[in-house]
């Protein structure tokens, strides 16, 4: 989701790379992008305060009553009644009071869960253990910049190292934990100048992702020069590109002040230029007045030539336009949204390498000299094949030309690998791969040497160096040390058959001695949207589950990018129901093969994955026992009215289109809740500052489910005052959210935690 959920959020996105440093996920956002038991450990901190509005409400063991105030809308002749429209007004006193009552009810239930204390202790053991991770690597001459996750610090730091083999010699450039010891300030992304003397850093507060650009001196770590406001946001992200002589930079920014009406301040991002030492009011407009209101911009500078490349995505549907600025300031558009050129990279000569999907749903790579841009004079250097080239709108690149090599990241239905070609497309030996792993994060170290990260479900992330001269892949010292014992865990990759016969992969992570007797508590995660590839990822907090005999499964559903453009299109717009059918097929497979049974099965997901859970909840309540949904989307008829919802129209569709409306209304979770249905136990978590999915979505869905369900299973809403979509949450907040989620799941699935040690 252009900004909503990239990278895919697996219930919660911990240590998520900054958007300008990651593939188009994410909301990556990821929000590809979660999840995990108990035992002895350090004393746990209390849960952060939840949102209570302006009213203090006494605890209660029953859900608070919710007034129905029906509003009728008519879409293409169809009348739709909305009983809870009033809950959309988050600033209204009556909504604050309702939210406070819901939080009180949720806390009463969650704090009384038998496993809560044990789960918190174990999660604290794992997530505060010394398992340092580096990501977002950005090389400069003699320097290597990186973000560093260093528990128990609340937020990642920006550090600089002499090399990937010398972490002991690093020094800190920016430490958000010193700026805000409570963890409310986060680094959204950073871009060093070409000489590495200065670094531009977007900083935001409270999970808002509204980032102002700060400049820091690398050597001293001191903030220098001017602060530029509103460079980053939760709707269209943000980007910076330095001049080759580091005297200034180009940057994206949102409208300010009275430049546009208040309702348009999250749209119309444009490109400006700032000269160091000058007032920001003097910054020069460069481009963007003719870009779409939902344009998302990524900037790249070619240091040798001084040319600037701007890639503009129209919302989140995978349509791109590309522009080139000459050193003399002339802008040239050489690709439009309909021609399926989705990425470009500067080559070592006077040319560009283009990733195209025209007639190539899995992607092909073209080369074109800059003087021929806009013509048909291109050469196909890597042809379309059976495997899919990763689309990486946000950094790092998936197509990386070096001096004599071309590195390309392929996704293989979830797992991924790096392949190497010469500059004419001849295949060459490449880096060694781990089985069922995810390789990426390409960073050029000069000449043809690259660094890349590799990880799997059971192998912690590590950075490797590949030298094509020796054809050797060596592990650097930038490697995570696992805080958990992974020796007794295995991964099974199975395939379910969806309703229309489509084969759908699912990764099943379980203990090696697990018996397939249908009695195993099981937690299943999925996403299925925005062309995002849900790749293997090592998350130590999963082991909070695995240590207690819980199976954890990750599905690769249509709507994602695991098998290319066709796979994505089979699960977006009017085809979205396929995603829910795929997920139901995965659940049925796990039951049929004896991994679990409906009373032992729970679901977890976030953002677009929350939509998946909501749809599964209303379509197949009999298939599972419980659901935990983070920052989910549920009212599909109103989502486009939120600022970031407009960016999602290219993925979901719009109610203005009769065919889109028909599909949206047919699966919209909020509109398909049925009175008198015994719904599974459900916990919804949301952040008051979420810029990607408005908390109103969780409020309305909670109210509707509480009114409709005929079962005694709880329907809970947990709203946090000082968090957003989860991408920049503090460590304390992540522990608190996971504690509530896992203790809830354990209780509903009948898991009684047993003590385990913190280290292997």
Image (spheres, grey):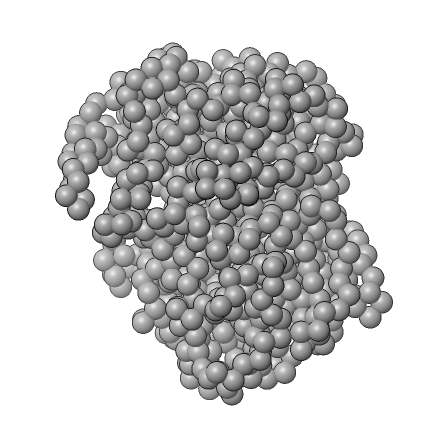
Q: Can residue 500 be seen by looking at this rendering?
A: yes
Place of residue 39 in the rendered image (x, y in percent of width and height, measured from the top left): 68, 19
In the figure, residue 79 lies in which quadrant?
Answer: top left
Left or right: 260 as drawn, with respect to 453? left
Left or right: 699 as drawn, with respect to 309? left
Q: How many marks?
A: 0
| Closer to the camera in the image, 567 or 480 | 567
Q: Residue furthest right?
A: 470
Task: Tell me the residue at 17%/28% (across/down).
Answer: 69
Place of residue 167 in the rendered image (x, y in percent of width and height, measured from the top left): 75, 53
Task: Tell me the residue at 44%/50% (across/down).
Answer: 570
| Closer to the camera in the image, 390 or 204 | 390
Left or right: 569 as drawn, with respect to 100? right
In the figure, residue 80 lies in which quadrant?
Answer: top left
| Closer to the camera in the image, 33 or 146 | 33
Task: Say above or below: 608 vs 447.
Answer: above
Task: Say above or below: 657 vs 75.
Answer: below
Q: Can residue 177 be seen by looking at this rendering?
A: no
Place of residue 559 in the rendered image (x, y in percent of width and height, measured from the top left): 46, 48
Left or right: 89 as drawn, with respect to 397? left
Task: Tell me the residue at 27%/57% (across/down).
Answer: 264
Q: Residue furthest front?
A: 501
Task: Say above or below: 192 vs 323.
Answer: above
Place of residue 139 in the rendered image (x, y in percent of width and height, measured from the top left): 67, 65
Task: Say above or below: 289 vs 691.
Answer: below
Task: Tell me the residue at 27%/50% (across/down).
Answer: 659
Q: Quadrant of the C terminus?
A: top right
| Closer to the camera in the image, 747 or 330 | 747
């Amino acid at each position: 989701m252009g900004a909503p959920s990239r990278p895919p959020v697996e219930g919660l996105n911990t240590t998520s790379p900054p958007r300008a440093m990651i593939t188009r996920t994410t909301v990556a956002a990821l929000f590809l992008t979660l999840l995990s038991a108990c035992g002895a450990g350090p004393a746990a901190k209390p849960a952060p305060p939840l949102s209570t509005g302006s009213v203090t409400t006494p605890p209660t063991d029953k859900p608070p009553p919710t007034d129905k105030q029906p509003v009728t809308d008519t879409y293409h002749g169809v009348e739709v009644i909305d009983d809870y429209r009033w809950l959309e007004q988050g600033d209204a006193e009556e909504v604050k009071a309702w939210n406070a009552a819901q939080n009180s009810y949720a806390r009463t239930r969650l704090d009384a869960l038998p496993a809560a204390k044990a789960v918190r202790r174990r999660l604290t053991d794992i997530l505060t253990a010394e398992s340092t991770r580096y990501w977002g690597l950005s090389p400069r001459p003699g320097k290597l910049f990186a973000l560093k996750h260093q528990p128990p610090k609340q937020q990642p730091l920006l550090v600089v190292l002499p090399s990937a083999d010398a972490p002991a010699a690093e020094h800190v450039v920016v430490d958000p934990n010193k700026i805000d010891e409570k963890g409310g300030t986060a680094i959204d992304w950073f871009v060093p100048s070409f000489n590495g003397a200065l670094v531009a850093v977007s900083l935001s507060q409270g999970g808002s992702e509204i980032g102002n650009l700060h400049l820091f001196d690398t050597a001293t770590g001191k903030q220098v020069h001017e602060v530029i406001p509103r460079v980053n946001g939760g709707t269209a992200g943000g980007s910076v590109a330095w001049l080759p002589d580091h005297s200034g930079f180009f940057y994206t920014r949102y409208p300010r002040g009275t430049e546009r009406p208040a309702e348009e301040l999250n749209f119309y991002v444009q490109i400006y230029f700032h000269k160091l030492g000058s007032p920001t009011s003097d910054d020069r407009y460069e481009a963007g007045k003719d870009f779409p209101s939902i344009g998302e911009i990524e900037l790249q500078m070619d240091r040798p030539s001084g040319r600037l490349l701007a890639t503009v995505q129209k919302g989140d549907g995978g349509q791109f336009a590309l522009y080139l600025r000459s050193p003399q300031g002339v802008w040239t558009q050489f690709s439009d949204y309909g021609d399926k050129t989705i990425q470009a990279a500067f080559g070592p000569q006077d040319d560009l390498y283009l990733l195209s999907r025209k007639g190539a749903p899995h992607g092909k790579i073209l080369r074109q000299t800059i003087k021929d841009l806009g013509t048909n004079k291109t050469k196909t250097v890597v042809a379309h094949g059976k495997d899919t080239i990763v689309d990486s709108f946000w950094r790092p690149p998936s197509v990386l030309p070096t001096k004599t090599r071309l590195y390309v990241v392929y996704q293989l239905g979830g797992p991924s690998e790096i392949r190497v070609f010469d500059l004419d497309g001849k295949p060459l030996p490449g880096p060694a791969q781990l089985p069922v792993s995810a390789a990426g994060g390409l960073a050029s170290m000069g000449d043809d040497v690259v660094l890349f990260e590799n990880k799997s479900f059971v192998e912690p992330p590590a950075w490797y160096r590949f030298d094509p001269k020796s054809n050797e892949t060596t592990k650097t010292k930038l490697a995570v040390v696992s805080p958990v014992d992974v020796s007794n865990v295995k991964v099974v990759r199975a395939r379910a058959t969806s309703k229309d016969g489509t084969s759908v992969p699912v990764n099943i992570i379980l203990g090696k001695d697990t018996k397939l007797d249908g009695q195993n508590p099981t937690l299943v995660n999925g996403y299925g949207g925005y062309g995002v590839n849900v790749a293997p990822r090592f998350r130590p907090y999963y082991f909070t589950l695995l240590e207690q005999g819980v199976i954890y499964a990750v599905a690769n559903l249509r709507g994602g990018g695991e098998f290319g453009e066709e796979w994505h299109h089979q699960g977006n717009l009017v085809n979205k129901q396929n995603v829910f059918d795929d997920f139901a097929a995965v659940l049925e497979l796990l039951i049929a093969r004896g991994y679990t049974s409906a009373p032992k099965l729970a679901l977890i997901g976030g953002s677009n994955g929350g939509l998946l859970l909501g749809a599964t909840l209303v379509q197949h309540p009999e298939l599972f026992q419980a659901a935990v949904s983070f920052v989910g989307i549920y009212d599909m008829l109103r989502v486009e009215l939120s600022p970031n919802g407009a960016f999602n129209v290219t993925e979901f569709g719009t109610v203005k289109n009769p065919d889109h409306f028909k599909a949206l209304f047919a699966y919209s979770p909020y509109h398909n809740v049925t009175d008198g249905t015994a719904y599974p136990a459900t916990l919804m978590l949301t952040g008051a500052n979420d810029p990607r999915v408005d908390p109103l979505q969780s409020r309305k869905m909670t109210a509707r489910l509480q009114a409709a369900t005929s079962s005694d299973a709880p329907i809970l809403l947990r709203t946090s005052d000082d968090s957003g979509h989860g991408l920049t949450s503090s460590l304390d907040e992540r522990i608190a959210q996971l504690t509530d989620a896992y203790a809830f799941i354990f209780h509903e699935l009948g898991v009684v935690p047993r003590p385990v040690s913190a280290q292997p």
